[in-house]
Image (cartoon, coloured by chain):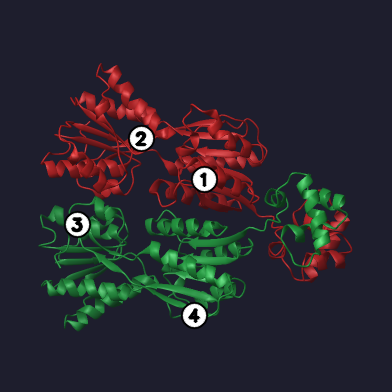
Chain colours: A red, B green
């Protein structure tokens, strides 16, 4: 028994059956009853019934992230999936990496899959803020479905952005280092994303406000890998620093391992602050002070907003700030 | 422009349009050309076209795991998504937790979403091997789609199981401890899953083969949380042990932190081996010896098998062993 049989038995078109299954208001009560009685007589549930035909009325959310194996992304997706499933949404998860052409391709593929909402997790989707064309594909998608950027910003209709206060919290940490007498604060980054730029801007602003120079040789780009970071720091012959602000916990722990090999004590000789407050921060020794950017709270708030939006509420804010906190542990003394 | 418009313009039923879009062989070449010319004239790609109607011909894989925020699960899902997307599959990811009723519900929900393959990641889906009814819902799903169990075993038609050699590798580690003179080897576990039972059986077999007693007070159940594990071990007044075999890296690192507080050296006073070879193992100090159960290789092999299966190949193995290796670092001396 399939949709064609139901249509035949009920004496209606398959378009009408589809409308009934999907609860379209365009069908008269009389027709609806007729179709439903055939479906019920055949002992088919609408869901199972719809399944074979792709007329499933279940709603879908497309979630795009660069890499689901990343700790931060997987935490975010876990919360999104849990909350959205409570509202009857299923989640189609795609990973795009960071390359421009693949990000665009993955959005197109998700759009072709009947998604009702698009969520983009990670600030790699924000573009560099200089070339607006870079994010045209997001505005294009937003013509069809609401787009939620989780820690990212793209200007456009139907695009809702959650922004971690990365600038503010890095300013705060850097100022804390300066208050404790640190003179040469290393900034370790693994990305050129929107978030990474906000963090670097916070670092520079704190230095400038304290009357310190912003030195190019203290801003290092590195792979987010503990041993790689340690070895890179060891490879510099004349690099002197007494504090580290890292944009990932893995980078920060690489610096702690560097200090151990150099015979320097943490936090006395070198203070270290990581980012994301991952399980790594508890694992290392001494345990790592890290910025908590609250991905679970951000994702919960985002789902609340999505539900208000699909329920027809107007005046949904389009730019939401997510405050960050510093989880103080043993690698800092402020 | 929607499917009804195309059907009207081509002078065919919407069922026929659907068949053309989905490449059904039941449509004549002449009708196919007629419908395609209308679609092309309207500048609609079949994909975008299908989108609005749920007639998308894209295939879907349902991936169920207890918790995507878990490091092991997220690594596995990352590989599955990447490889399956290369074959044109999209991934619907659901998280079930570990409760029986929710596992069953989530499988039913995935089944109602037109999935072509069901993948269950995590040995929590294997049941306890005592009550076959517990896994009836998996055999039920396998009547409709092939089911892949990634590190788990369920007997049944159309069910393909990948099994890590957990017994063997834990036997090997425990025997290594014994060879190095360890007398009281602690077994730390956070689960009663199929995999956890295999690991405990390997531990017990190694003790028995060496003529050692299997002691209940050396088999501890604990939450997979570094500080929780450390504090639990500290809370035992008379617990003596000189080695730890843990089924999760987090548990093993809890034991390392316990040793530090007690003033015991690792690996001399207490040797420690973890499981999953996660990033935590590199983060802690000393760095942790850990079992690598090769989730990436397992997932790659599973996708290869899925593709052979959907391409109609027969004689696909139904039970595949995944060898584990020991990544030796600084917390063991064998």
Mark 1 vs mark 3, foreground winner is 1
Give the distance between the C-alpha atoms of the residues marked 3 and 4, in whole angstroms.
39 Å
Residue B119 x/y as whole percent: 51, 66
Q: CA distance from mark 2 to mark 4?
A: 49 Å
- The answer, for residue B93, to whether it is visible in the render is no
Marks 1, 3 in one chain: no
Sequence-wise, the earlier of marks 3 and 4 is: 4
Task: Say whether residue A142 is left or right of residue B261.
Answer: right
Residue A199 or residue A306, whichever sits in front? A199
**Residue B7 location, x and y as percent?**
84, 53
- Disc 3 is attached to a residue of which chain? B
For label 4, the residue is B155
Cα gap from disc 2 to disc 3, whole angstroms? 28 Å
How far apart are the two marked residues, 1 and 4, measured between alpha carbons?
40 Å
How many C-alpha atoms fall within 10 Å of the one at disc 4: few (<14), some, or many (≥20)?
some
Q: Nearer the viewer, residue B230 or A7?
A: A7
> How many neighbours does mark 3 have within 10 angstroms: few (below 14), some (14-19), or many (20 or more)?
many
**Residue highlighted by disc 3:** B256
Disc marking residue A325 = 2
Q: Which residue is mark 1?
A: A102
- Distance from disc 1 to disc 3, alpha carbons, whole Å, reads 42 Å
Mark 3 and mark 4 on one chain: yes
Q: Are marks 2 and 4 in contact (CB under 8 Å)?
A: no
Quadrant that contains the N terminus of chain A: bottom right
Which one is closest to the eye, mark 1 or mark 4? 1
Assess disc 2: are there few (<14), some (14-19) or many (≥20) residues with their C-alpha within 10 Å of its C-alpha: some
Write down the chain letter for disc 1: A
User: Residue B7 versus residue A47: which sits nearer the camera?
Assistant: B7
Q: Are marks 2 and 3 in contact (CB under 8 Å)?
A: no
Q: Are marks 1 and 4 on the same chain?
A: no
Secondary structure beneath dot 4 equals loop
Query: What's the CA distance linking mark 2 and mark 1?
Result: 33 Å
């Amino acid at each position: 028994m399939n949709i064609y049989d139901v249509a035949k038995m009920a004496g209606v078109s398959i378009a009408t059956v589809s409308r009934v299954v999907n609860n379209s208001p365009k069908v008269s009560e009389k027709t609806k009853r007729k179709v439903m009685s055939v479906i019920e007589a055949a002992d088919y549930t609408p869901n199972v019934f719809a399944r074979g035909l792709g007329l499933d009325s279940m709603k879908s959310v497309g979630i795009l992230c660069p890499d689901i194996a990343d700790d931060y992304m997987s935490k975010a997706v876990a919360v999104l999936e849990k909350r959205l499933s409570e509202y009857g949404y299923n989640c189609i998860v795609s990973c795009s990496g960071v390359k421009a052409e693949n990000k665009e391709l993955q959005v197109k593929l998700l759009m072709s899959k009947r998604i009702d909402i698009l969520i983009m997790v990670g600030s790699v989707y924000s573009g560099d803020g200089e070339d607006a064309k870079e994010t045209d594909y997001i505005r294009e998608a937003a013509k069809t479905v609401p787009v939620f950027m989780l820690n990212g910003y793209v200007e456009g209709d139907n695009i809702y952005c959650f922004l971690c206060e990365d600038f503010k919290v890095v300013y705060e940490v850097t100022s804390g280092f300066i208050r404790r007498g640190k003179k040469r604060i290393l900034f370790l980054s693994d990305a050129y994303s929107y978030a990474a730029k906000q963090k670097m801007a916070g670092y520079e602003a704190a230095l400038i406000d304290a009357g310190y120079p912003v030195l190019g040789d203290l801003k290092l780009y590195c792979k987010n890998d503990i041993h790689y970071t340690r070895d890179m720091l060891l490879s510099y012959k004349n690099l002197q620093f007494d504090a580290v602000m890292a944009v990932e916990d893995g980078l920060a722990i690489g610096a702690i391992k560097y200090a151990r090999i150099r015979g320097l004590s943490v936090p006395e000789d070198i203070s270290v602050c990581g980012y994301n407050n991952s399980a790594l921060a508890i694992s290392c020794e001494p345990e790592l002070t890290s910025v908590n950017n609250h991905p679970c709270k951000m994702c919960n708030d985002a789902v609340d907003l999505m539900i208000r939006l699909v329920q027809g509420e107007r005046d949904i804010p389009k730019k939401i700030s997510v405050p960050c906190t510093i989880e103080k542990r043993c690698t800092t003394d402020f």
